[in-house]
Image (cartoon, rainbow, N blue to C red):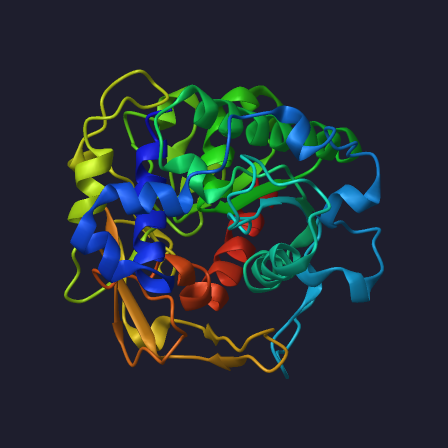
Amino acid sequence: MCARRFLIIVFFLILLVVGGGFAVYQWGSNILLKQATPKGHFAAAAAGAGPNYSLANNWAARPDMPADADASRWLPNAFPQGAAPTPRAAVFFVHPTTYLERDRWNAPIEIGGETEMRTQLFIRSQASAFNGVGDIWAPRYRQAAYGAFLLKSDDANKALDLAYGDVLAAFDEFHRRNPSGPVIVAGHSQGSLHLLRLLSDRKAELKGRLVAAYVGGWPVGIQADLPATGLSPCTQPDQAGCVLSWQSFGEPANASLVTDSWVGTRGLAGIKRQQDDMLCVDPISGKQNGAALPNDNPGILVPTTDLSGARFAAGQVGSRCDHGFLMVSGAIPRLGPFVLPGNNYHVYDYALFWGAIRRDAERRLAAWSKH
């Protein structure tokens, strides 16, 4: 899969931050591959049986779960809750990669440990942005291990296809339980990779129902990808049935590793991706190729380890689209150790715009309800 090359870069950068960076620079890709490539060959059985999504335990978030077990219902301390919209949307959210081991190509559903902790963290800090407008469904899935993105091989392709098959099955169960009314789909990183493919494969089921698709932390080609989904970019904040994509960088930004990897690959529509075709929708203004001042940002999350004491800070971070990437500016607080080389804020694509994404979803749901 051509788009996999983008995640090669993402995880390469993460490895530079969290371990072995100097060795990778000194001795090259052999060390990177040795440290990251899953052991042995792909075997579907190693990830266990496919999940039955009619069962609640195969979901990380679902509206019929107890509230204290559903991280998607989290809100920052003292955050004011507005009146619930009518109608409420059904939200399908696909979390990013949280399995960082290399003992197999795909993570089992019930992996537990640090993988589960990271899954809960991302559900809490990302999916929660949508709990003001709808009930959130976030499947557990046999996600591809991060090393699956480092090789262009039959094993890697099978690992990604297995993960996507689970996401597709989860969406079909989600659709069965939510047969009518407005729908929001959202994801991040690996989740957005699968989500973009799903938008193409399930466009008939989403037709007329989609409020918006939030394809965060993943590059999308306006001409190379979107025609296969039947959807258009979100050009205005009061537009429904459209796609948002953004990739956050600070100044001075160096995104050449991303562009060098993505440009020239073949998109879902069958044509090659180009730099000037990369979609950027500013989450604050809600406009394609938009920009916003820090005072316009309703709030970011300044995270703690488990977010129980996360600070919600308004009016600090501005943004502007620049050649397909989202440049952040202003009084950017210390967010944690995972700002990647090149001033890449990939890990914080949602945290920097949590309040803006929440507001954006409210506006688009209101626009959908008027049609």
Q: Find residue 125 and report its image quarter.
A: bottom right
Q: Is residue 213 above or below residue 264?
A: below
Give me the residue at 44% from left, 35% from top. Answer: 148
Q: Is residue 226 above or below residue 211?
A: above
Which quadrant would the C terminus be assigned to in this image?
Answer: top right
x and y percent of residue 357 in the render?
48, 59
41 to the left or right of 325: right
Residue 346 visible here: yes
Q: Find residue 80 and report its image quarter.
A: bottom right
Q: Nearer the viewer, residue 172 or 231?
A: 172
Count all numbered tags in the image, as a single digit: 0
Give me the residue at 35% from left, 80% from top. Answer: 333
Q: Nearer the viewer, residue 11 or 238?
A: 11
x and y percent of residue 172 in the render?
70, 27
Which quadrant would the N terminus be assigned to in this image?
Answer: top left
Q: Nearer the viewer, residue 78 or 264?
A: 264
261 to the left or right of 95: left
328 to the left or right of 64: left
Residue 213 visible here: no
x and y percent of residue 36 in the render?
41, 45
Q: Is residue 235 above or below residue 79?
A: above
Q: Nearer the viewer, residue 40 or 252?
A: 40
Q: Is residue 296 above or below residue 267?
A: below
x and y percent of residue 286 in the render?
38, 54
Give me the residue at 51% from left, 35% from top. Answer: 195
